[in-house]
Image (cartoon, coloured by chain):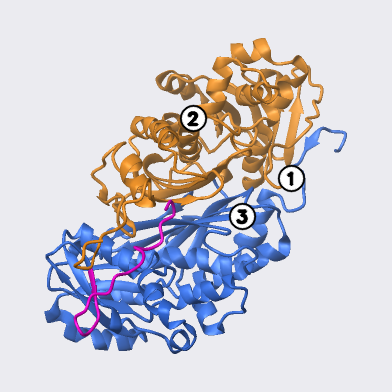
Chain colours: A orange, B blue
Amino acid sequence: LPANGYLLAKLMPLSEFDVIERYFNVAGAQRDDVVLGIGDDAALLRVPADRALAVAIDTLLEDRHFLSGSDAFDIGYKSLAVNLSDLAAIGAEPAWATLSLSLPSADGHWLQAFADGFFSLARRFNVQLVGGDTTRGPLSVTVQVHGFVEPDRALRRSGAQPGDKVYVTGSLGDAACALHQLQAGHAGDPLLVERLNRPVPRVHVGRALTRQAHAAIDISDGLLADLNHIARASRCGATLWVDRLPRSTAFAASCDPEWVLPMQLSGGDDYELCFCVDPERAERLPALAAEAGVTFTEVGVMEKKPGIRCRHDDGSIYSPRSGGFDHFA
Amino acid sequence: LPANGYLLAKLMPLSEFDVIERYFNVAGAQRDDVVLGIGDDAALLRVPADRALAVAIDTLLEDRHFLSGSDAFDIGYKSLAVNLSDLAAIGAEPAWATLSLSLPSADGHWLQAFADGFFSLARRFNVQLVGGDTTRGPLSVTVQVHGFVEPDRALRRSGAQPGDKVYVTGSLGDAACALHQLQAGHAGDPLLVERLNRPVPRVHVGRALTRQAHAAIDISDGLLADLNHIARASRCGATLWVDRLPRSTAFAASCDPEWVLPMQLSGGDDYELCFCVDPERAERLPALAAEAGVTFTEVGVMEKKPGIRCRHDDGSIYSPRSGGFDHFA
């Protein structure tokens, strides 16, 4: 220290301040509605006067939500993707994110790859990182996202009605199948592993559905569990036609036949949308799917009777093994 | 399962859904600006048209931000308090919080005590919990808070000017002294331990200062480090008069004299505010302090010269040992 008693902040390798400055204060979208971003006690943001603010928060833990040793790019990507998927499910347009990152050590290569993954998705959906904190501890990533939605058009879980057709986007079971392959020590089918590690949040579909659907949810815990959330919130039930659940070519080729339905019904992590549409509005869906570049598959129908019934196309009952992933089960 | 193929969500003891429902969906403030709270993919919220949304996020980890075995009430309380302190520092009025909780196991008594601590503070500051998630993992608590502030009156770190008087609220060093006592295996002075475990965020002071102060920050990393944040953001420096730093009676009575200044300058966790005021506006401060029931102490002056200089009242230089707590130091 100079003899005149100066105290400058000690320049320590990869201090908390360095981490934020070096890796997180530079990349991603720059939005006009951010009055004050990273670097103060709080971010200051502007919400359009005619929109509700939509807020979702999710934490990813090592060995719980991603395998130990996962690629840092994928962890950064997925930590934002799962949150954007929640905004998609409620029909909101993404705007800002905050990030709380707990790390065993401040490894520059890891941080750069994590930031690259996070911001690759942030740029794609015009999301600006506006704040966060970093601490030393077990690897854990908490992201909160903020978006805007017309308050009377938000896709609530509670809006489904008996008679609504039940649809899912994309294909189901891919992520669960990839996880099974990786946990068995295999390299995993690249297409399936891509679906596990880099799910594409169905943001554009969610926005378009605000004018069409009665209810929506993203499939994070498995279709059965998530459709059951809609059914309970809407005080009704549903029948699912299990033979109609959409399968990707890669999934169909590599999934043990015995595991096809369990993975499609109860495997989590697909981050597709499940939504309920009045039959009279269903005719508009093909155009919407084509515009979004995503398939929509009709997989069931909402009914007055509570609970979810699974049936084969011949009418016989299928009994699922599990109701979905539950963190304290 | 009934023979008709019903699948109801399995009722598992303390599932993620139960945790949210049982402990977190019932208590705390109920606000008119919450369109949709806990229980959907995202919360839907209304921000007043003439206000900026202020957002802050902070994570508390066991053994890092609180001692292992800390009282669950205190962890719940403090996880919200440190975030409300960030809103106070920017001059915002608190509104909503989200919570991401990682727990080694779902212990009902622990969760009830945690929720009691969290909501005791939430009710006091009219904060509604609007969302969150729970996962099994190492004990970790991430809270994000949202508030409102007039965009042109927010207390940014960057607004200080040379000549501004530097003030702190309350007393400094209490939390560091309590931590030292507890880590040495003592019971700790109850008043100091209260300051460590249940800091009172200076929300009302922050709101009042939006009309008076050029800049503010909350003292979480220690006065030196935090004032240095203001100085750097404002492209200036400061002199601190170390003999004038406010001490509580309990601190003065139990702190080793050799540790008084290090704890006051570099001990974190006090969550007082440090703020900078134009000398011409300083005359209004005593009335404001009286109204808030908090003491304000003038401890320094902002100067053009970069860096923070510490001096005794006789003009001699004091050389601090450390620049504050840094999570990757």
- Residue B18 vs A283, above or below: the answer is below
The reply to the same-chain question for discs 1 and 2 is: yes
Is A118 left or right of A242, judged from the image as shown? left
Q: In front here: B284 or A117?
A: A117
Q: Is any part of residue B32 visible from this angle? A: no
Residue linked to disc 1: A329
Q: Residue at x 72, y 62 (%)?
A: B108
Q: Secondary structure at mark 2?
A: helix
Q: CA distance from mark 1 to mark 2?
A: 26 Å
Q: Is residue B319 magenta?
A: yes
Q: Indicate the position of residue A266 as horizontal and vertical percent values.
A: 69, 31
Amino acid type shown at disc 3: Leu
| Boundaries of the magenta span | B309-329
Count neighbours of disc 2 (C-alpha within 10 A) and say few if under 14, some if 14 to 19, many if 20 or more. many
Q: Residue furthest front?
A: A3
Q: Is any part of residue B273 visible from this angle? A: yes
Residue linked to disc 2: A74
Q: Secondary structure at mark 1?
A: loop
